[in-house]
Image (cartoon, grey):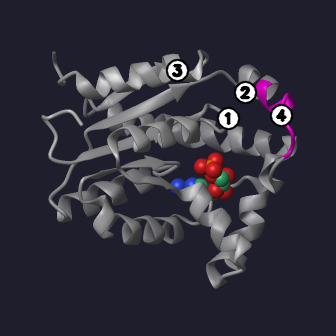
């Protein structure tokens, strides 16, 4: 890990299909910090048919956003776990400005802050093309659900992106390149001191 961080708290933003989850797991492995994916946590709750899973299943399958309070509660509980002390990489949370404000409040209470917020940028057409070339793996992978997820992303993303851009925390990365190239950019941005 870069010596300038006592803990490495990272956030990855980006539309569905931008490689967010792949990049988050690479970062988690490289810096030995937990990969916290709200999509995976919700998928797990649905598979286990937990009370929370049953509550969110329909909304999830349609590609809409699950209730802010439900997701925020889940994340906050996770961030409080022992293995997050050295840092974490958040993938899929926050999804809107309200969630970003909730996250700020919690981190402030814990006396922590975010080191970098990455935005993986990829156009809708490229996302739809990539999607058409892979097998259906999950219910929310259906083309209709993907379109809904893209619509929701474009609705919520501007305020979310502004939230972090206004604080000078946002790093935009061109996600139309190979996994390795994108991952190199992320590593460089993390290991280069801000303002250098
Ligand atoms: P993802 O795997 O991150 O693309 O998320 C899959 C689905 O989980 C989304 O389409 C939403 O239905 C739900 N979800 C994931 N993260 C959030 C979040 N932060 N807020 C609300 N819903 C979420």
Report which residue position mark 1 lands on.
17
**Is residue 174 visible from the viewing direction of this image?**
no
Residue at disc 3, secondary structure: helix
Q: Earlier in the sequence, mark 4 or mark 1?
A: 1
Numbered tag placed on residue 117 in the rendering = none
Q: Earlier in the sequence, mark 4 or mark 2?
A: 2
Q: Earlier in the sequence, mark 2 or mark 1?
A: 1
Q: Residue at x 46, y 30 (%)?
A: 119
Q: Is residue 100 left or right of residue 24?
A: left
Along the viewing direction, whichever of 124 and 3 lies nearer the viewer: 3
Q: Quadrant of the N terminus?
A: top left
* Image location of residue 96, percent across then percent down: 49, 49
Q: CA distance from mark 3 to mark 4?
A: 20 Å
Q: Quadrant of ligand 1?
A: bottom right
Report which residue position mark 2 lands on.
127
* Image location of residue 79, percent across then percent down: 34, 64
Report which residue position mark 4 lands on.
134
Q: Residue at x 38, y 51 (%)?
A: 100
Report which residue position mark 3 lands on.
180
Q: Residues within 10 Å of mark 4 (few under 14, many from 20)?
A: few
Q: Residues within 10 Å of mark 3 (few under 14, many from 20)?
A: few
């Amino acid at each position: 890990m870069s010596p300038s961080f006592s803990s490495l708290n990272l956030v990855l933003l980006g539309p569905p299909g931008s490689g967010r989850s792949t990049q988050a797991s690479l970062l988690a492995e490289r810096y030995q910090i937990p990969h916290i994916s709200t999509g995976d946590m919700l998928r797990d709750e649905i598979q286990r048919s937990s009370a929370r899973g049953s509550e969110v299943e329909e909304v999830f399958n349609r590609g809409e956003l699950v209730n802010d309070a439900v997701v925020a509660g889940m994340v906050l509980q996770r961030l409080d776990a022992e293995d997050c002390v050295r840092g974490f990489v958040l993938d899929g949370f926050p999804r809107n400005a309200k969630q970003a404000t909730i996250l700020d409040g919690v981190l402030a209470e814990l006396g922590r802050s975010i080191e970098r917020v990455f935005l993986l940028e990829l156009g809708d057409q490229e996302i739809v093309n990539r999607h058409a070339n892979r097998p259906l793996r999950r219910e929310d992978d259906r083309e209709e659900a993907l379109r809904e997820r893209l619509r929701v992303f474009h609705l919520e993303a501007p305020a979310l992106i502004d939230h972090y851009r206004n604080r000078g925390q946002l790093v935009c990365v061109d996600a139309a390149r190979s996994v390795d190239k994108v991952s190199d950019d992320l590593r460089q941005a993390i290991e280069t001191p801000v303002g250098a």
